[in-house]
Image (tube, grey):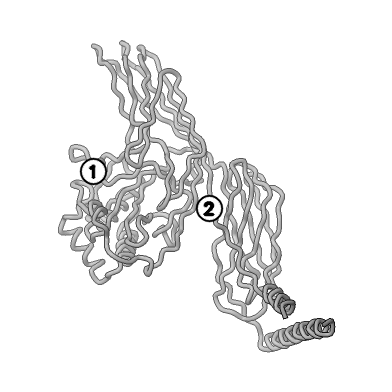
């Protein structure tokens, strides 16, 4: 009897094939960033005890963002430096000593950073309860920036959210309103507040973020500001062109989540964050306004300096150039043939290496529900150089008709920075088979089942006779 039970379990396992899964970070991108600061004395006398700060640098982030500094190098042509943590942010303070008239000194900061795609799959039923007392400080207004106490902002926030009790829906209402209400205009030199954005109905990423934060706070949702970068390939290596701002909010039950009303069209980034977002600084707003003027921390503001002041005053300047190289980045696109022939549906996975480094040992899997599809074996590509792509095809046997069954491609590959995982977008597949084809398939299933039963009975008879 024990032998028959073991045989039955083996046969059962052969008919169950769960979808492949990966716990690793998916759709990761590795960037190499270099910022060069040239500190020049354009005056006629020496400047002594020169200190340049703050030089904001990238740091590790987890939770609402996934960012890891893989390596970091800070080089000074002369002097010393100190890395100072300030809350969630990091700054470099460089002491350059004496800079004589006509002399320049250089500071170079090089970082290699890995950024992961963040999508925890948050749904409304995951957001439960009320806002903790210690998070309510992030619902306060900030004068001249987030005027959540203004009647115009407050009225709009309540009109958008009062009919919803779940904070997910409240935040989503504000998110949808801001992205539809404001018209995007290119980067402007002057920062404007949330109230200005509401009245003028336009702005760049800063105004979009300010209006979202102000409305969220007016609705009782804790919200903060992020200053960072949005990688855009069309700017090449010019990192100075990639400054970006977005927000993150607190939802009870899931805590802090990212919000970007301008990125990721057509869905935008609500409770998720694409790996082209690099976080430089975060703020609760209290340090973003000085003397009534908006002063965003990070690379939107130039570093300041101090020195022992002689007479006449030396004319010091700090010029910055920034470059970025996308070292590792891979995209996977899943397409399907328009017709199913002889119950075989062809799928095509296009793997493209958009990073600067060659990748190797690429393994491509086709993921689908085995109840409806015969999942083929994974395929391998030995290497793929920068800028090249490779198409891998899968002939998938369709077992039965189904509506909206999820299929996806999963990649694993090696790079000079380690092994990574990437996924294509999920595709809803809805194959429809003719009734005659379905009937033949049913007969095949019955015949297969009968054959299996026959094997089991035959084995049982042999075992009984051996006794």
User: Quick check: 96 above or below 362?
Assistant: above
Q: Which residue: 58% across, 73% down?
A: 429
| Residue position marked by numbered label 1 in the rendering | 286
Q: Which mark is residue 80?
A: none
In the displayed structure image, the side of residue 33 where residue 463 appears, left or right: right
Residue 152 location, quadrant: bottom left
Nearest to the observer: residue 324 or residue 361: 361
Residue 432 visible to an observer of this rendering:
yes
Residue 255 x/y as whole percent: 35, 57
Q: Which residue: 30% across, 45% down?
A: 283
| Residue position marked by numbered label 2 in the rendering | 25
Residue 264 x/y as whole percent: 44, 57
In the displayed structure image, the side of residue 289 where residue 72 appears, left or right: right
Looking at the figure, which quarter contains the N terminus? bottom right
For marks 2 and 1, the one nearer the N-term is 2
Residue 200 visible to an observer of this rendering:
no
């Amino acid at each position: 009897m024990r032998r028959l039970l073991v045989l039955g379990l083996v046969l059962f396992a052969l008919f169950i094939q769960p979808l492949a899964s990966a716990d690793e970070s998916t759709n990761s991108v590795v960037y190499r960033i270099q910022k060069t600061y040239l500190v020049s004395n354009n005056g006629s006398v020496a400047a002594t005890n020169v200190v340049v700060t703050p030089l904001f640098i990238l740091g590790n982030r987890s939770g609402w963002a996934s960012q890891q500094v893989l390596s970091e190098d800070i080089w000074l042509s002369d002097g010393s430096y100190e890395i100072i943590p300030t809350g969630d942010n990091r700054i470099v303070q460089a002491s350059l000593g004496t800079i004589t008239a006509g002399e320049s000194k250089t500071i170079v900061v090089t970082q290699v950073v890995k950024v992961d795609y963040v999508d925890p799959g948050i749904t409304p039923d995951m957001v439960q309860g009320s806002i903790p007392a210690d998070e309510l400080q992030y619902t306060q207004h900030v004068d001249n920036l987030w005027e959540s106490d203004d009647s115009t902002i407050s009225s709009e926030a309540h009109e958008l959210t009062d009919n919803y009790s779940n904070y997910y829906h409240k935040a989503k209402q504000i998110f949808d309103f801001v992205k539809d209400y404001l018209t995007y205009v290119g980067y402007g030199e002057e920062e404007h507040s949330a109230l200005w954005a509401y009245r003028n109905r336009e702005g760049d990423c800063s105004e979009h973020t300010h209006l979202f934060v102000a409305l969220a706070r007016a609705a009782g949702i804790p919200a903060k500001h992020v200053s960072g970068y949005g990688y855009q390939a069309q700017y090449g290596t010019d990192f100075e062109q990639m400054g970006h701002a977005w927000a993150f909010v607190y939802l009870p039950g899931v805590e802090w989540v990212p919000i970007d009303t301008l990125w990721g069209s057509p869905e935008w980034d609500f409770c998720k964050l694409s790996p082209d977002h690099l976080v430089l600084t975060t703020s609760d707003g209290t340090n973003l306004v000085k003397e009534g003027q908006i002063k965003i921390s990070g690379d939107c503001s130039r570093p300041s300096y101090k020195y022992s002041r002689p007479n006449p005053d030396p004319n010091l300047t700090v010029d910055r150039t920034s470059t970025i190289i996308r070292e590792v980045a891979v995209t996977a696109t899943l397409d399907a043939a328009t017709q199913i022939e002889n119950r075989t549906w062809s799928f095509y996975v296009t793997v493209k290496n958009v990073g600067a480094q060659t990748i190797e040992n690429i393994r491509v899997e086709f993921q689908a529900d085995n109840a409806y599809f015969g999942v083929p074996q994974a395929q391998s590509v030995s290497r793929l150089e920068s800028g090249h792509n490779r198409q891998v095809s899968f002939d998938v046997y369709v077992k039965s008709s189904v509506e909206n069954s999820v299929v996806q491609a999963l990649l694993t590959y090696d790079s000079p920075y380690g092994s990574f995982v990437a996924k294509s977008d999920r595709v809803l597949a809805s194959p429809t088979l003719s009734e005659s084809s379905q009937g033949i398939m049913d007969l095949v299933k019955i015949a297969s089942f009968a054959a299996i039963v026959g094997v089991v009975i035959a084995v049982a008879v042999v075992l009984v006779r051996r006794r």
